[in-house]
Amino acid sequence: MFRKQLTIFHVGEIPIRLDLSWFLILLLFSWSLATHFFPLEYRGLHTSTYWFMGIAAALLLFTSVLLHELGHSLVGRHFGIKIRGITLFIFGGVADMAEEPYSPKAEFLMAVAGPLVSAVLAVVFWLIAKGVVLFRLPLVFYGIAEYLSLANTFLLIFNLLPGFPLDGGRVVRAALWKAMGSLTRSTRIASAIGRGLGITIALLGLVSLFFGGQISGIWLVLIGLFLRRAAEASYQNLYIRSGLEGLRIKDFMTPRLVSIPAEISLAVAVQEFFLRHPYHIYPVVQEGHVVGFIEDKIVKTISSDQWQAKSVLDVTTTDPFKSAVNPDDDAVKALVTMAQNGVGRVPVVSEGQLVGIISRRDIMEMIRIRMALTK
Ligand SMILES: [Zn+2]
């Protein structure tokens, strides 16, 4: 969710991004098409022709995936759901919705829009392939069009599998939601089905590997594991969003009153602070101002016979300031900031002053309490 991405262009206001893994997969796809699929299907062509076919087909396949995702996004936008962007990554595309659909009907229509686009593309490429034969155009174009017709058909079928968060799984969730009236409960069931489906696909992949289907086996295992993870992540995402709805950081940050003077030695800091309070990180104060932070993990990297000679200021860092959040920020912002910086807690700063600390553990505890009482 929080990896390196590149925005390539916008459709309307929707930014289209590439995950860095996309370049790797484009290369792998082109390679496997140019060296395996096309040479087996169309014998006797030049190596460079196969590579042209491979690269063109891979690029058009990713374009097809993008159009599929745009189908979802445009229907979503029609229903007033904010779309933050579309990211193309290792297994296709993901439309990043800022929120969940408002009704089972919106969910259903949004879910089927993507597969509908894939179905249209499959037919269009099939017609192009027929046209190539009819007008006696080079075989190369027939090969590319036929492959894309097949690939879009595969995308259509794969996405209609009933495992959430695949489109078919979203249809299932829409139906459960309509029947039970609870988005959280229907998401929990739909994502459990998604996890089960993911594990089943991965196991099929292992069986296929065992019987000699190397490439298809590896693909199935990867797709299965990916689906399992995505099912878990989408449920957690909903769980966190609904658990934190309406909360601001100041609602559950810990106001921090204990700070360490910059001039004392590390030995004193350890004795008087780290061994006495249950905190990992302290603001460091010099002449009444916070100048940075001292963390137990940094103290631990210095051998204890030097603690007498070194002062707190010597190991003070200003790093946590960079990931500081504001007390009026949305609570989800704190979790996002922690994930982006790979830390478990971030300082809360208002108008240049440290006003508290917020930790992932506190946020998760809050979510548990709220979800238990409001289910
Ligand atoms: Zn889809």
Image (cartoon, rainbow, N blue to C red):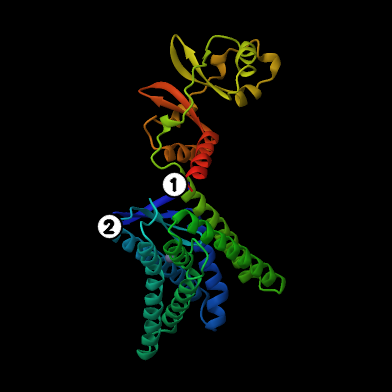
Disc 1 secondary structure class: helix
310 with respect to 10 (left or right): right
The residue indicated by pointer 1 is 242
Q: Is residue 3 visible?
A: no
- Taking depth in this image into account, of 358 and 122 the one nearest to the observer is 358
Q: Quadrant of ligand 1?
A: bottom left
113 with respect to 36 (left or right): left
Residue 129 place in picture, x, y as percent: 40, 84
Q: Is residue 327 above or below residue 126?
A: above
Q: Is residue 197 visible?
A: yes
**Is the C-beta of the residue carrying label 1 under 8 Å from the nearest atom of ligand 1?**
no
Q: Is residue 153 above or below residue 229?
A: below
Q: Report the amino acid beneath label 1.
A: Ser
Q: Tell me what residue is drawn at x 44 percent, y 30 percent.
A: 322
Q: Report the amino acid beneath label 2.
A: Gly
Disc 2 secondary structure class: loop
Which picture quadrant has residue 71?
A: bottom left
